[in-house]
Image: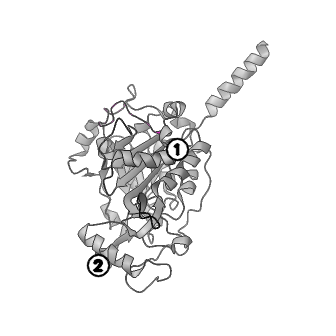
Amino acid sequence: MNLIYMLALAVIQLSQAERACNNSPKLCSKSYDQVTHFGAHDSPFLRNEPTGFSSFGNQFFNTTVQLNAGVRLLSAQVYVASNPKTTARELHLCHSSCALFDVGPVHEWLWEIRVWMDANPTEVVTLVLVNMDSVEAAELEIEYSMADLAHYGYVPPVIDKAPPPSSEFNKTWPTLGDMIDKGERLVSLVNPLKPDVANAPYLLNEFDFVWENQYAVTDPADFSCTPDRPSNTTTIREMRQSGKLFLMNHILYWQQAFGIQTPEARHVADTNSWDGRGGFGTHLLNCGNELGRQPTFVLVDFFNVGPAITSADNVNGINRPLGRKDVTTEVIEGGRMRKMLNGTAKAGGPSTLALVIALVASVVMDVKY
């Protein structure tokens, strides 16, 4: 009996020792705010064959592939739309305009994420949703419920204010291991959002907890760490003291005719590299030095190229990630040279109406793609 007990105990201890949180045993004891969560900017908007390698696509591979490859932060844009058959009000994932690039109802994308999370029980995922039409939390909550995703939602002790910064001896955010053990391993940040403790306490107003650097960069020399959003941001020092978590945008746009900007894929091998021109790794190190701690969130376009995730692994201290699926690190053929409004790359491109809408949006709303 003693031998059986000892063997069982050894198996349990071995299992615990081998548990990987977000692809690494090293991260299980790290608090949520002390990990760099690697993210795919505009995750559901693809530049691939089914979309005709759309100029507006930010990623070559879908959300499931992103998650399998190690992405743990997903961003998207949410709009009010009409059902094409019934004209009923719906929430859709659209890129800058639903007439331009509509990839369908929000709950279908959330369902994809829920299926992945069910199959990967030791992973913590973060969503950043741009609430373009300022819908209420209760309406967004319906989408989460339809996807059966709400039960994974993390609810902080105070839902409208960031806690003080964590330290080595005082973790003000739970560890990844704790979040996994409690089943609260989905953090949802929505901008803008009025918190609703009664109906959806897990839906958090992004800028109550997060600050960002500039995101509309067209020259790789211009990547910086200076606070840019929300509008009342001040200095890096004050942002750090506020307890808000830093989301580092590392996204390069291609400036085209009529002021339209599209995701830059021509030079992404450098942009997403460790130390190329405008390199992601250099940007991470610079911001970490200026902030005095590693960025909590990072967003890139074309996540697989670089490979950008290697830079995030470096700052997280991960040498041998576990459980990831390999994906090509190359720019997908057909996805590099995608000009707008100039007669090139017509196949599969946006319709004339969509381009007109894009032009109007870029002028009136200063929309970035």
User: Of all residues shown, which one is farthest toward the front?
Assistant: 86
| Sequence order check, earlier mark of 1 and 2 | 1
* Amino acid at dot 1: Asp
**x then y, percent, for residue 332:** 55, 70
Q: Alpha-carbon neighbours of circle 1 within 10 Å: few (<14), some, or many (≥20)? A: some
Reply yes or no: does residue 139 show up in magenta: no
Q: In front: 118, or 48?
A: 118
Kindly identify the residue that appears in the image at 43 percent across and 60 percent down. 93
Quadrant of res 361: bottom left
Q: Secondary structure under badge 1? A: loop
User: How many numbered marks does the figure carry?
Assistant: 2
Kindly identify the residue that appears in the image at 44 percent across and 77 percent down. 338
Residue under pointer 1: 148
What stretch of residues is rendered in magenta? Answer: 153-166
Give the prevailing secondary structure in the magenta stretch: loop
* Amino acid at dot 2: Phe
Reply yes or no: does residue 164 show up in magenta: yes
Tell me: 86 left or right of 158: right
